[in-house]
Image (spheres, rainbow, N blue to C red):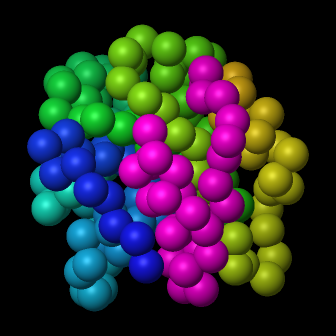
C-alpha cells in the first residue's frame, strides 16, 4: 500500500461526526486501534483529524481554519450512511489548500445515500472531482486516494 510522502504538510480530514474520518486517519498513520469519537483536533504522523462537531457548529469553523494552516491537503469526507450534511455551500472555497472529496463506508450493504447524492453535496461544498469511494473495512479506494495525493 502507498502512504503519504510529504510529512511537512499534513492531510486534514473535515466532515460530520461518524463519517469515518478517524478510521481514515488511522489507516494513513498505520495505526490499528479501536476508534472513538474525536473530541479535539488530533495530530497524527501525517494527518490532522478534526472533530465532526467543528463542521456541525458554525461557531467552530475558526478552529478548522486555524488547523488547516498545517495542512497540505484537505479531505472533505461524506459517508454513505450519514443522517445529514453540515457543509455550507462553497465552504471549501475559503481554503487555499488542495481539496479532495472522499466518500466513506462504501462496504455498507444498505446505504442511506447514493453516490450521485454525495457527488452533488460535494460539488455544493465547492470540492471538484475526482472523488474517491473508500472503505476502511475492505481498503477499497485507499491506495488510489493516497497515490493521487502523492502525484500532485
The magenta stretch spans residue 87: no
Residue at left offset 79%, top offset 82% = 109
Does 78 sit left or right of 40 as displayed? right
Does 103 sit left or right of 96 as displayed? right
Quadrant of the snapshot with the C terminus:
top left
Residue at left offset 26%, top offset 23% = 65
Indicate whether 80 appears above or below 151.
below
Indicate the position of residue 118 as horizontal and vertical percent values.
74, 45
The answer to whether residue 31 is seen in the rendering is yes
**Image quadrant where residue 104 sits:** bottom right
Which of 83/14 is in front? 14
**Image quadrant where residue 61 sits:** top left
Indicate whether 89 appears above or below 149.
above
Does 135 sit left or right of 55 as displayed? right
Q: Give the range drawn in magenta.
A: 125-152
Indicate whether 147 appears above or below 57.
below
Residue at left offset 55%, top offset 30% = 87
Indicate the position of residue 32 as horizontal and vertical percent values.
28, 87
The magenta stretch spans residue 151: yes
Indicate whether 69 appears above or below 133.
above
Residue at left offset 69%, top offset 36% = 129
Quadrant of the snapshot with the N terminus:
bottom left
Amino acid at each position: 500500500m502507498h502512504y503519504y510522502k510529504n510529512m511537512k504538510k499534513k492531510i486534514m480530514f473535515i466532515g460530520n461526526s461518524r463519517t469515518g474520518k478517524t478510521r481514515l486517519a488511522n489507516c494513513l498513520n498505520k495505526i490499528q486501534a479501536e476508534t472513538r469519537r474525536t473530541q479535539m483536533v488530533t495530530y497524527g504522523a501525517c494527518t490532522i483529524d478534526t472533530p465532526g462537531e467543528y463542521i456541525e457548529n458554525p461557531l467552530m469553523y475558526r478552529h478548522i481554519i486555524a488547523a488547516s494552516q498545517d495542512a497540505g491537503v484537505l479531505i472533505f469526507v461524506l459517508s454513505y450512511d450519514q443522517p445529514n450534511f453540515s457543509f455550507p455551500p462553497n465552504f471549501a472555497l475559503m481554503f487555499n489548500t488542495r481539496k479532495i472529496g472522499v466518500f466513506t463506508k462504501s462496504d455498507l450493504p444498505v446505504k442511506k445515500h447514493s453516490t450521485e447524492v454525495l457527488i452533488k453535496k460535494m460539488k455544493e461544498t465547492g470540492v471538484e472531482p475526482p472523488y474517491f469511494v473508500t472503505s476502511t473495512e475492505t481498503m477499497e479506494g485507499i491506495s488510489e486516494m493516497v497515490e493521487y495525493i502523492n502525484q500532485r
